[in-house]
Amino acid sequence: MNQKTKLLYGILVLIALLLPFQDFIYLVFAMKVLCFALFACAFNLLLGFTGLLSFGHAAFFGTAAYITAYLCKEAGFSPELGIVLGVLGSGALGFIIGSLAIRRQGIYFAMVTLALSQMIYFLAVQMPFTGGEDGIQGVPRGTLFGLIDLKNDVAMYYFVLAVFLFGFALIMRAVNSPFGQVLKAIRENEPRAISLGYDVDRFKLMSFVISAALSGLAGSMKSLVFQLATLTDVHWHMSGEVVLMTLLGGMGTILGPVVGAGIVVGLQNYLANIGSWSTIATGFIFVICVLAFRRGVVGEIVAYYKSKN
Amino acid sequence: MQETILKTIGLGKSFKGFSAVSDVNLDVSRGTIHALIGPNGAGKTTCFNLLTKFLEPSSGQILFNGLDITNEAPSQIARRGIIRSFQISAVFPHLTVLENVRVALQRGLGTEFHFWKSGDSLHVLNERALELLHEVGLEGFANEETLNLAYGRKRALEIATTLAMEPELMLLDEPTQGMGHEDVERVTELIHRVARGRTILMVEHNMKVVSSIADRITVLQRGAVLAEGSYHEVSSNPLVVEAYMGSHEGAKL
Amino acid sequence: MSNMALEVKNLESWYGESHILHGVNFAVRDGEVVTLLGRNGAGRSTILKTILGLTSKRTGSVEVYGTETISMPTYKIARLGVGYCPEERGIFGSLSAEENLMLLPEIAPGGMGLDEIYEMFPNLYERRNSPGTRLSGGEQQMLAMARILRTGAKLLLLDEITEGLAPVIVQKLGEVVTSLRNKGFTIVLVEQNFRFAAPLADRHYVVEHGNVVEVVQQSELAAKASLLNEYLGV
Amino acid sequence: QSGAKVSGDVVKIGVLTDLSSTYSDLAGPGAVIAAKMAIADFSKDGTVIGKKIELLSADHQNKADIAANKAREWYDKDGVDVIVELVSTNVALAVMEVAEQKNKITLVSGAASLPITNEKCTANNVHWTYDTYALSNGTAKAVVKQGKKNWYFLTADYAFGAALERDSTNVLTANGGKVLGTSKHPFPNSDFSSYLLKAQASGADVVALANAGQDTINSVKQASEFGINKKQTVVPLLMFITDVHSLGLNAAQGMYLTEGFYWDKDDKTRAFAKRFILQHKRMPSSVQAGVYSSVLAYLNAVQKAGTDDTQAVMKALKSTNIDDGLFKGKIRADGKFEHDMYLLEVKKPSESTSPWDYYNVRAVIPAAEATQPLSLSRCKLVTNK
Amino acid sequence: MFELLGITPQGLVAQLLVGLINGSFYAILSLGLAIIFGLLNIINFAHGAQYTMGAFVAWIGLTQISQWLGFPDLSINYWFALIIVPLVLAGFGLILERTMLRRLYHLDHLYGLLLTFGLALIIEGMFRHWYGISGESYPAPELLQGAIPLESIGIILPKYRMWVVVISLVVCFSTWYVIERTKLGAYLRAGTENPKLLQAFGINVPLMISLAYAYGVGLAGFAGVLAAPIFQVNPLMGSNLIIVVFAVVVIGGMGSIMGAILTGLGLGLIEGLTKVFYPEASGVVIFVIMAIVLLIRPAGLFGREK
Ligand SMILES: Nc1ncnc2c1ncn2[C@@H]1O[C@H](COP(=O)(O)OP(=O)(O)OP(=O)(O)O)[C@@H](O)[C@H]1O
Ligand SMILES: Nc1ncnc2c1ncn2[C@@H]1O[C@H](COP(=O)(O)OP(=O)(O)OP(=O)(O)O)[C@@H](O)[C@H]1O
Ligand SMILES: [Mg+2]
Ligand SMILES: [Mg+2]
């Protein structure tokens, strides 16, 4: 990372830290953005850096959301424990779905993940503990480590921010790690990677599980922020949304998914008043993005700077 | 010293009734350069695919250092020290040339699953990578994106990457294909040099290369062994001349 | 003077941002065989691709049998009677060998018949029902060459056709090219294998850094041997 | 009244509804218009106790998290005092939860589930227009009483469908009827022919549709395609006038259904409807009428309490008899607005004389019968006493 | 009487027929998708919206166009719609292809999917805005109104549905014939793999691609017209269907024409039977099948392994 990038990240973190001291951006909205940004980053680890397009990531997001919500509400778990178990749950699910899906490639991979996540959706509708279409509502945020009362939005915000930064740093590290190098090689030329002695499936599975677990982390956080877990979290629309976030922001860029999440969540929020026009507007944004800003917002900026230098 | 490193017993492969390789008994001695030649479609690449388990043999056994590896996975075989190159060039196009080689070197570090470790931990490999690039004459391109290399250079890079694996047994599928004469000579010389201390099994149509460095030659035809011996023995075998080399004029191409 | 089959003037070409050809000039008369020689990466394959409009951008002039093609779509250029055998062979994996062979539309009368082709390449006959990319490297190479002989195209752009072929087949290809030449085909040959190309061609163009830097007539071969050696390291 | 305590010096009403997806016809933009009409009818200059009345609206897309997020933002940041409409139960429950935490008011009109005023009830909520208890009691009882005792259910396979089926089954069996079979269909679903064939083969008198929205519309349409409505009676347990409108009378004729409001019931409703259609180009649905009524009642309660303080307003709401010409009744301790419901029969095309002339009112179901008795309520506000 | 899990054999036959009807829709739609995917390398997410559009255009033709144009007697009836609507949709497809999709061929599938996803949102949003969510009713043509009563089993089958089965089978199999049994099929497959090279052999690939997309969209519109009298014509009718149709295409094998047709029909039947015997699972059965098929036969039932 060069000096300029470091400076940029520093400024961004500073802004994030100062956010509770203003009135312009609503804190819960900011938390939502952070949750989805983490989700999109986790997804990008798979799409942008492993070259696997999963169309079923909602399954991990939603499963963790349900687990955390259920444990915190019905079993009275503390939030940190609820989150850890949620992440473990989605990681385990990631292992199962991943083992099945990584045996296939390209569009088939996308479709297998979609199919398996549809089954998770089916379970979420059918199983008694998920509360059917009403979901699990009124999840208590609880007190973190028995010390910090998360009912307070500011406390909750810093907690979400800390978790996000942790997840983000982990992903950034993973991408540039020795592991990340091998992933990149696999994405580029799989047979060659095999012939160099890499057990490609294990690498793919590993990145799938990491991505699933981090998506779960995002889902768990979301269920605490909004204090609910619903079918929306496991619906394929959610899987689609995260793809859109990643692409809008710029897939394969580190900061892209964060920006993409901000844009999509913001659109949802601020276009909410114009009813059916919001669908149309969203549609137009995608069309324009694909036709004109294919690299995504961050990707375009990066490309611009590259071409200038 | 003439110990067998790789041995196949009755190796065979058929595709939907068409048998591409049948009953091949190879015997590759340690420390030699062994060439596999034969007309197009004779089954050479298929043999390679079987040895590295990119294809599942229909019959037969593969012994590496006396060990039966017939049922092992491709990556496992690679880790045992059998590394192959591909007939159609196989590089990682969007990595730099240096990174290409490093991916191969990286396995030696044993950190390939460490997703929490910094990428800088790989810099220790740069020196060795540059060395390897130097050997194939690509050191000037170290930071070039591989995509932009011309075909011949990609082949050279592939050899460097393969070398990086410090293979005990190297399988080269037409290493000089598509190269200019200069390159061919350099690569031939390179193969000859790196062959010291390891074993090479190569497929090659360029008889100049084969005659100059191969210690032993197996000729395949229609999936079966037609002849075996030194270049001299093989090239004077009328069957081989008819099926493969053509007139002696052609052999000197 | 016989008619021009191909006339390339000031040809420039790009792949995306990268500028590869910088004003290439050469001309081939009907019935001639010429080669493009050069080191790896010199731009020889790119010249062939550019003639057919397969690069992302090109400028200059390319006349095929007297028709200016610089702003024509690729398929129309092909229909002027150009047959192309690409460097990476371009066999279609979803088609069988025979379908690959039969795929190309006949663009002019006088193409070879299927029997004739199978006679020339018996391997192909044997493997005709296999999916195209399941053929061995060399078989694919034969297929790529064979299929353009069916179309009746008279101007052939051949990119490294001897690559990966057994010496016997190379010999045979030499005979094929000679016989095509005798039948009046015009051939532009990109070759690494100079010994293969040398006796076949009327003229050799040496390409370096996207330019034609030297022209060597068949008759001057001996005289310019050292020059060629310098360019190509033969 | 200038000394009145009004938070933020303005009374803010938020219409949180489905503006763009499944329920946008029966609630949606029409609900926003209804709320605007209520404010206009309440005061010409748009004020209450001297303070300005402001209206916000947003789309929750039927997603609980979007709804909860918006509600939080409205309550926290925009100073909204009351949120109305809230079609679809999961949305209503999520927003009620937020409102309870923030000590603000919700007036639910569009959602139908009984738990809203039972196990999930809150002190700051009123359930305005209808609930599944009213639907099943109204329709099921009336139909069984006509002697159509053997029923076959097509039930949407989710909690709401199951609740509708269960409640109706209770009424059915209590009145001597019998369930011959049930087909659970996924939600949403578009082809119902398999289920309809089974229903047909079962020989039941009644094919009851325990589903909603598009599912109901398509079931009715296909039932008529299969000629089922000729031999058997199709009974949609939840259907709105907007659904009948889009189906057309040909397919819908002869069905029985229960609603809390029908525009053509009397002069007052007709007068309201006439004004409404001018703005919306469609007749008001019961949900939209409910929004009008709830907003009007809220403003009256603010006036009466002299403040927009939540407790004071809730007290005023629950202690006033409501009669705005559309709905008449009072609000119980558990938050249920108790009012009459109407059993309606869809007219034949030949009977319909003007656009939107769709129903014959077959019976008035008195408030007491259309509402779950307080004694059975599982609401904490009632059981704790 | 012999009964299987509470269903009479006659009842079962009726159920199978009903399943076949849905199968026909799956077949036409997945056929269109398969052609488009096969040739343009684009997963046409807008396929559902184009199907919706077909139904709406038919409805507009029947009821609205007279007002629009001011000729009170003008009305495009069902039979004309069956021909005109697919042409209108094909024209629409042609415009989309020429102006937008064309720029995406050299890119990853993902971009095509995203673009068409955006298009789907726009199309759906427009209809939603104009005609509301509850949709409109389209009557069956007079000739096909009513039902054939099968008194012996107490079951009635609408004539219109019979017609749907017949006409869709005809359309599907003629399409298959044209693509697989003529040289066109070989061009299509080769064009999928390497369009540039195919052009270098003298084939007008851009035109072929435009027409293929137009044809695929036309098929979607055709299915829309067929569906209008059965389902409520509403803006979401397509988006509810499209995911299932995707699954059908994948199960059949990407790019296999016959695969798309047979799988469509077969899955319609299976789904129909699930609705009878275990209705709760009918929403997920296709995905279960898809997962199983992909694990056993990665390229799909009829797909070629790479
Ligand atoms: N996967 C496959 N399916 C069907 N046939 C195959 C397959 N792989 C190879 N073959 C056939 O097996 C034969 C041997 O092919 P192989 O690639 O081993 O030849 P080769 O000796 O390497 O030839 P070349 O020198 O031309 O590369 C060929 O006839 C080829 O068509
Ligand atoms: N698709 C491409 N995109 C960008 N650059 C390319 C592309 N293809 C080739 N090049 C570059 O164009 C130059 C000329 O390549 P070309 O393939 O024409 O060389 P060549 O003379 O045929 O050599 P070779 O013997 O390697 O085939 C090379 O520098 C190469 O890196
Ligand atoms: Mg080979
Ligand atoms: Mg070349």
Image (cartoon, rainbow, N blue to C red):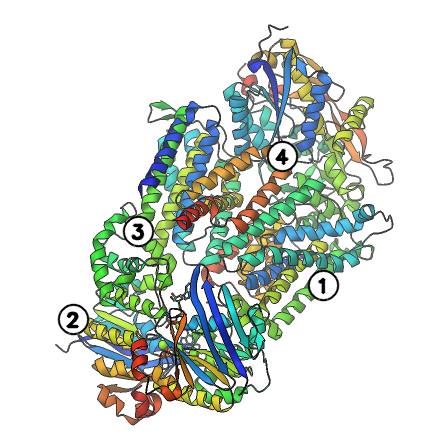
What amino acid does circle 2 point to? Gly
Q: Chain of mark 4?
A: A
Residues at marks 4 and 3 on the same chain: yes
Label 1, residues with CA under 10 Å away: few <14, some 14-19, many ≥20: few
At mark 4, the secondary structure is helix
Q: Are marks 2 and 4 in contact (CB under 8 Å)?
A: no
* Residue to which mark 1 is pinned: E166
Residue A55, image x, y percentages: 48, 50
In the rendered image, the vertical position of residue D190 relative to residue A21, given as above or below:
below
In the rendered image, the vertical position of residue D105 relative to residue A259, given as above or below:
above
What amino acid does circle 3 point to? Phe
* Residue to which mark 3 is pinned: A179
Picture disc at residue D38: none
* Residue to which mark 4 is pinned: A274
What amino acid does circle 1 point to? Val
Q: Nearer the viewer, residue D192 or B188?
A: B188
The residue that appears at 48% across and 91% down in the rendered structure is C182
What amino acid does circle 4 point to? Ile
* Residue to which mark 2 is pinned: B197
Side (left or right) of C50 relative to D377: left
Q: Nearer the viewer, residue C157 or C100?
A: C157
Q: Quadrant of residue B125?
A: bottom left
Residue D63, image x, y percentages: 56, 35
Q: Nearer the viewer, mark 2 or mark 1?
A: 2
Name the quadrant of the C terminus of chain B: bottom left
Q: Chain of mark 2?
A: B
At mark 3, the secondary structure is helix
From where the camera sits, is residue D189 visible? no
3D distance between C-alphas at marks 2 and 4: 74 Å
Q: Chain of mark 3?
A: A
Residues at marks 1 and 3 on the same chain: no
